[in-house]
Amino acid sequence: MSKVGADLVEAFEEMAAHLRGEIEVESYDVPADVLTPARIKEIRRKVAPSTKIFERDFGISARTIESYEQGRRKPDMAMTVLLRVIDREAEAVKRALAR
């Protein structure tokens, strides 16, 4: 078995032992301001019912926001800032983008 395979087997055995209540594992809380895929989806749903409407309103392509929501891509710092501003002041962003 490869090293990766052995590590996976060990990880699954540890997870099973934890689920059976045999061992405790270290856990941590993700701060609310961290943009996880679920948090990005939450922000998008708060301001737009679909990725296409989000694209129309904020100029971020539907495909890009979908890739963030699915965890295939991670937003860079500029996009992180924009998403946080959209979360807090969506109407201000819409006004700034109005033509």
Image (tube, rainbow, N blue to C red):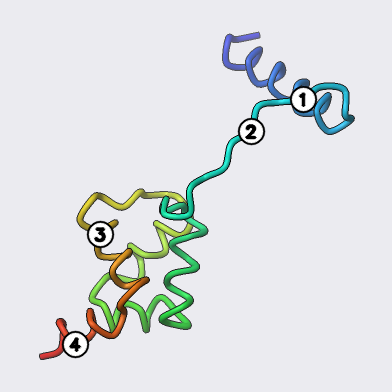
Q: Quadrant of residue 21?
A: top right
Q: Residue at x 43, y 62 (%)?
A: 40
Q: Earlier in the sequence, mark 3 or mark 4?
A: 3
Q: Residues within 10 Å of mark 3 (few under 14, many from 20)?
A: few
> Residue 54, relative to residue 76: is it above or below?
below
Q: Residue at x 50, y 68 (%)?
A: 42
Q: Earlier in the sequence, mark 3 or mark 1?
A: 1
Q: Residues within 10 Å of mark 1 (few under 14, many from 20)?
A: few
Q: Quadrant of residue 18?
A: top right
Q: Name the amino acid type tagged 1.
A: Glu
Question: Which dot marks residue 81?
Answer: 3
User: Is 24 in front, or is 20?
Assistant: 24
> Where is residue 2 shown, x and y percent of the image?
60, 10
Q: Name the amino acid type tagged 3.
A: Val
Determine which residue is flagged by label 4: 95
User: Looking at the image, do the residues carrying marks 3 and 4 touch, with CB atoms under 8 Å apart?
Assistant: no
Please identify the quadrant where the C terminus is shown. Answer: bottom left
